[in-house]
Amino acid sequence: MKISINIVQSILFALILFTSFAFYKAAFAVTLNIDPSLPEQQQLTIECVYPIARTDGTALALNEIAQVNFYVTKDGARTAAGSNNTACRQVYDMSNVSDATYIYSVTALDTDNRESIDSPEVVTAIVKRLTNPNSPKGLTATIGSLP
């Protein structure tokens, strides 16, 4: 299993790799702290690798995958957060989401309409806008002659 995170030109990428149609309860998580007030942290892209086998170990061809479903859980409520025909990639605009913890997971749906359980990896995005620092205080000035 390999997890990698890259920040590239205002896009925060989280790469989730999964290699089998057999998914188990989340065993690994990537946690990202996101401050959407910063331009380079306003977009979250989650990518995955297609499953290559079914739960019984038999091969799963790419043309047998009908779609990939992305889910997000916030405050215990899970909702669909995007599905693509066969694109194992989803982009989220984080600039208008409320400060909270978002947990993203992925499933695969085969052409016979069987959906896998959640990916063993999840992405946890902790969204918190930081406030500006206080202004400096206690300014003083002195006057003197040049050397």
Image: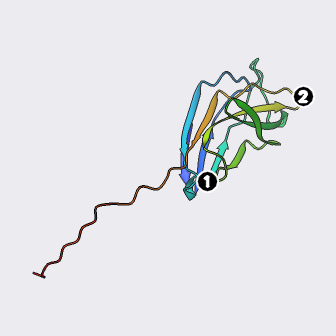
Disc 2 marks a residue whose amino acid type is Asp
**Res 112 label:** 2
Q: In this view, does 30 lie above or below 42?
A: above
- Asked whether the viewer can see residue 103, the reply is yes
Q: Which of 132 and 36 is in front in this view?
A: 132
Q: What element carries label 1?
A: loop
Q: Determine the residue positioned at 63% across, 32% down.
A: 122
Give the mark nearest the N terminus, 2 or 1.
1
**Res 135 label:** none
Q: Determine the residue positioned at 84% across, 33% down.
A: 64
Q: Find residue 133 and report its horizontal and vertical position in percent.
A: 42, 55
List the single residue furthest toward the left: 147
Quarter of image, res 27: top right
Q: In this view, does 100 lie above or below 141?
A: above
Question: How many neighbours does mark 2 have within 10 angstroms: few (below 14), some (14-19), or many (20 or more)?
Answer: few
**C-alpha separation, residue under disc 2 versus residue under disc 1:** 37 Å
Q: Is residue 32 above or below residue 25?
A: below
Q: Find residue 137 and report its horizontal and vertical position in percent.
A: 32, 60
Q: Is residue 131 above or below residue 107?
A: below
Q: Is mark 2 on a helix, strand or loop?
A: loop
Q: In this view, does 31 lie to the left or right of 85?
A: left
Residue assigned mark 1:
42
